Image (cartoon, coloured by chain):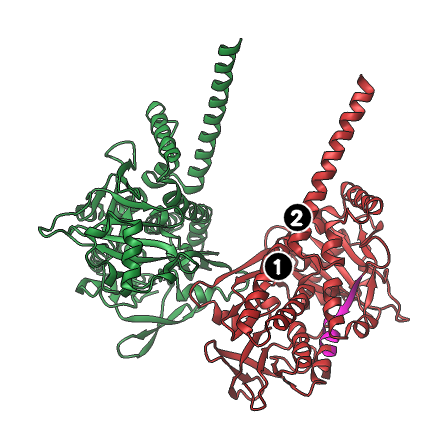
Chain colours: A red, B green
Amino acid sequence: MSKDGRHHFVIVGGGLAGSLLAVYLGRKGYRVDVYEMRDDIRGGNVAGGKSINLALTRRGIDALAHAGLAEQVLASAVPMKGRLIHSESGDTSLQPYGKDDTQLNYSVSRAGLNAELLEAADSHESVTLHFNKKCTGVDLDEPSVTLADTVTGVEVRVEADVIVSADGAFSAVRARMQKLARFNYSQQYLEHGYKELEIPPGVAGEFQIEKNALHIWPRRSYMMIALPNLDGSFTCTLFWPFDGPFSFDNLESEEDVRRFFEEHFADAVPVMPTLTADYLGNPTNPLATICCGPWHYQDKVVLLGDACHAVVPFYGQGMNAAFEDVLVLDACMDKHKSDFGAAFAAYYSERKEHVDVLQRLCVDNFVEMRDHTGSKWFLLRKKTEKMLSKIFPSWYVPLYNMVTHTRIRYVDAVRRARMQKQVCALVAGFLVIAVFLLLFT
Amino acid sequence: MSKDGRHHFVIVGGGLAGSLLAVYLGRKGYRVDVYEMRDDIRGGNVAGGKSINLALTRRGIDALAHAGLAEQVLASAVPMKGRLIHSESGDTSLQPYGKDDTQLNYSVSRAGLNAELLEAADSHESVTLHFNKKCTGVDLDEPSVTLADTVTGVEVRVEADVIVSADGAFSAVRARMQKLARFNYSQQYLEHGYKELEIPPGVAGEFQIEKNALHIWPRRSYMMIALPNLDGSFTCTLFWPFDGPFSFDNLESEEDVRRFFEEHFADAVPVMPTLTADYLGNPTNPLATICCGPWHYQDKVVLLGDACHAVVPFYGQGMNAAFEDVLVLDACMDKHKSDFGAAFAAYYSERKEHVDVLQRLCVDNFVEMRDHTGSKWFLLRKKTEKMLSKIFPSWYVPLYNMVTHTRIRYVDAVRRARMQKQVCALVAGFLVIAVFLLLFT
């Protein structure tokens, strides 16, 4: 505890989850030090060169609103009304995200949002931000962390009352916890990787394809998507297997790349002037699901966001679930006051089952996006769902809407969707029998 | 490659799998160095003080036989005819393991078997054994390992053509591979732990309970088992949850321990004179399932046994599956000669699916042993199985027998058991209908 009697939190990782938690803890009056491995993103030093974007949905918006930050974040976001599907022939069709324009997703810049959250954290007198500090050691029992300056190499050891691990999918803190007896841990990679590409703004700064949509080029075993940025550009992501006869492994020359895109994404090629350079220059990254438990060590260490439940990006829920972690952790700390051990245990017990379900949903949604969004049956199902939710608005809510536009917990959403489906199947069965009886008796 | 043109293998870990592989590689004429963290077990320096025992079954026996070692190992093993069930009232009943006395399991001493395998490896001029050498670093690309002498602390770096990781469930080599992009890994612990206890020989050196059996005290949510040792003693293992209202966590005093055993394992207490001292002195150990892939890195590193597929002990297949790894790896190396990359890929592809299935079988068999072996329905099922396998010996083989007494691959065994079950259910259904028709028409 600090000399002034305030508990001292060290947050490892100043990314989206870590910086939002710093805002929450700062508001509670705790002394908080945030240690981020990269440089201060507010100086425009965006790692990797390109700013990528993310879908912000209800859970994330609520967590931002609780810290008074939702309005300003949404002001610099691009609303997306639905999925805009690009068929191989170049036809496009919009599949709305929600029942009406109140149910939108928002495309936000990861770097821009991170900068806003860091700024908000920095405005609390009890919060101090430290950059270029890489966590090289963790003592769970003390608890303390060792931090190396990435510029000078100098190491310092910092003690705290609580270490918060918000250091992402490759968390150093979780790696230490993995060595604890009876710590469950799993990392599972998809066969697919992803590569980011770009559609720049037009000559007058205009959006070259529909601004207010998430674009999908579904091609069954693979797909490309594009999310709009505020400056008129789109960040495209190609999801494709790493290896095999038809994979990232097979395109080597500019000619290979151009031929592949002209064959499968013909309508995108004219708006992607830097395609071959982007393709050959940008890395192919892996996609992992990370699952572990428990998420805390006594009252000393607690895990948050990707550090304890990294998901694949196909439900757009990674950041939103991490922000919801912050909301739930905050509520548990309110309830249990300074009994951090009880608060962390309650947070783990409240969240674990739900993010486990989310992890499966995210993997399943990849199949939906790449295989089904292009099919007529899928469109018919979506239309039936929309009709049902209009006729029975309080009873029928499609699973996607529960996940994206509500804070119904993931496992409850899946249960309710299953129940809705069973009732519909039953009713459909009765209707078929009734029609049969009317016609043949 | 060595100066004499022979490939050089470094085996990290001189336990059961590592020392058997050293025998195989020594026979092939490769230059082999085995680095074991503990002292030479042949000097009687058994880690942990107590020698524990293991069930040796068909797969393990075949792998030993291929190296000409089966006879000598079986000569110092105790044959077990079946499971001897101890009910709470003290009644006992034998459930045979196989169709007759040709289908036995064997209780072997881990330390004794390990010593025999090390001796066999040491007899090859091209195999060198090194003890008290702990692996502290791994370079996958070189490939090389850093080894620290556990007595002097001096570190040396050893290069090789191939590093074999036979360093068990907490493998240092696998921990390094886990950091590779796209390496799948999972460690899952049971809620139960285990504690070893002892039934010593009688005053005249005799076995105090039935010698030729694996004893089980099934108590639904927990159980104790005992395997015979050659010296007339039995090693008992209590499997019980770590925490909760009825768990290891709850017995603290000698009085607690005595009361618990007298209530639940009354017939064992008289033959366990050191019970309370053993219980309070011996550690409670966790039970983990470890799953990963791929099992090799190019043609440079390959994983074996517990290092890539540690299982919980309830099917008695951990050592046997590790020995079968050695058999399969050996066959793949025969087929692909010095193309180690192809040999390791073939070995992984051949084994992975099967040990994945084994891992589920082992967890499921815990439920069978502790919950079902004591029930009348289970006995009836076992008797029906035995009858079917006598009437249709070439068609009906119980799953347990396929896993334990054959080398049918685990996934094929499970598939065949499912098919047998479906046919039996179908036949039973027809019989019920036939009887119904005969009686009521």
- Residue B324 drawn at (x, y percent): 34, 48
- Residue A120 drawn at (x, y percent): 73, 81
Classify 10 Å Cα crowding around label 2: few (below 14), some (14-19), many (20 and above): few
Q: How many marks?
A: 2
- Which residue is found at the position 74% from the left and 51% from the top? A218
Q: Which residue is mark 2?
A: A415
Residue B310: tell me if it is visible. yes
Mark 2 belongs to chain: A
Q: Which residue is mark 1?
A: A355
Question: Residue A115 lies in magenta, yes or no?
Answer: yes
- Residue B128 drawn at (x, y percent): 25, 64
Left or right: B147 as drawn, with respect to A114: left
Question: Which SS class for mark 2?
Answer: helix
- Name the amino acid, label 1: Val
B118, A181: nearer the viewer: A181
Classify 10 Å Cα crowding around label 1: few (below 14), some (14-19), many (20 and above): many
Q: Are marks 2 and 1 on the same chain?
A: yes
Q: Is residue B399 above or below residue B19?
A: above
B14, A25: nearer the viewer: A25
- Residue B162 drawn at (x, y percent): 38, 62
Q: Earlier in the sequence, mark 2 or mark 1?
A: 1
Q: CA distance from mark 2 to mark 1?
A: 14 Å
Q: Which mark is residue B108?
A: none
Question: In the image, which residues are magenta?
Answer: A105-116
Question: Which SS class for mark 1?
Answer: helix
- Which residue is found at the position 64% from the left and 64% from the top? A284
Mark 1 belongs to chain: A
